[in-house]
């Protein structure tokens, strides 16, 4: 075991180097123009009194909650709260819909109940094919909403459903998730600066 490997054998130095490479690559893929297009959709919706919904599974559920909190609370500036909701937090809704309709419908059903024309769904999925996230995006489109997708490097059904699809490089879900939260923080900062700056 090398000096950089922990007890489980992970090459920590190698992982950190790959993480830094992914972060650097975000400047080209998806690049600032694409992130700004996504942020403008969110900012325009909030400025019009619309709602921004976030969804994802596992670590992406954590990202959904984190980013909704940045908008409801604050990112860097003192300002009023923005209308944002993570669809990952209501255990009664998640378990009722999962039990009665199937887990693939847990976000779709909430979108059908909450999202209106002009609202935005931010769909977060490292693999790009989570059925519950794809169905939520389909429902959002049918209801006249806009979809922003945070994805991994591979093609996804969300490419055709999203107004802006942001593909993040990375050979593992963990590296993709690091890219997602970096983009999400940039998006929230851009929105706040546009609306409150």
Image (tube, grey):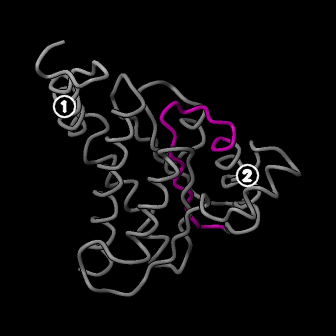
**Residue 119: in magenta span:** yes
Query: Image quarter for residue 131?
Result: top right
Q: Which mark is residue 106?
A: 2
Q: Secondary structure at mark 2?
A: helix
Query: What are the residue bounds of the magenta stretch?
Result: 117-134
Above or below 86: residue 56: above
- Tell me residue 127's x, y (percent): 52, 30
Q: Secondary structure at mark 1?
A: helix
Above or below 139: residue 195: below
* Residue with the most extreme front position: 7
**Marks 1 and 2, Cα distance to the nearest angstrom?**
35 Å
Q: Is residue 64 left or right of residue 106?
A: left
In contact (CB < 8 Å): disc 1 and disc 2? no
Above or below 181: residue 14: above
Query: Image quarter for residue 20?
Result: top left
* Residue with the most extreme right position: 100
- Tell me residue 111's x, y (percent): 70, 60
- Tell me residue 119's x, y (percent): 58, 66
Q: Is residue 173 left or right of residue 87?
A: left
**Residue 83: in magenta span:** no
Q: Residues within 10 Å of mark 2 (few under 14, many from 20)?
A: many
Q: Which residue is mark 1?
A: 16
**Residue depth check, mark 1 versus mark 2: number of the one nearer the observer:** 1
Query: Image quarter for residue 188?
Result: bottom left
- Quarter of the image with the N terminus in it: top left
Counting residues from the start of the chain, the first of labels 1 and 2 encountered is 1
21 vs 147, nearest the viewer: 21
Q: Which mark is residue 162?
A: none
């Amino acid at each position: 075991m090398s000096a950089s490997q922990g007890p489980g054998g992970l090459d920590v130095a190698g992982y950190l180097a790959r993480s830094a490479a992914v972060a650097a690559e975000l400047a080209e893929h998806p690049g600032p123009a694409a992130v700004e297009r996504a942020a403008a959709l969110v900012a325009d919706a909030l400025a019009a009194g619309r709602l921004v919904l976030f969804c994802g599974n596992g670590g992406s559920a954590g990202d959904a909650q984190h980013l909704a909190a940045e908008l409801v609370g604050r990112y860097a500036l003192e300002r009023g709260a923005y209308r944002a909701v993570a669809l990952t937090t209501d255990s009664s809704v998640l378990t009722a819909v999962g039990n009665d309709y199937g887990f693939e419908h847990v976000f779709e059903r909430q979108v059908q109940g909450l999202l209106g024309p002009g609202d935005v769904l931010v769909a977060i999925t490292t693999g790009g094919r989570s059925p519950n996230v794809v169905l939520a995006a389909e429902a959002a489109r049918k209801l006249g909403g806009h979809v922003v997708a945070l994805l991994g490097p591979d093609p996804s059904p969300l490419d055709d459903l999203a107004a802006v699809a942001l593909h993040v490089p990375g050979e593992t879900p963990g590296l993709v998730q690091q890219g997602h939260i970096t983009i999400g923080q940039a998006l929230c900062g851009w929105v706040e600066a546009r609306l409150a700056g």
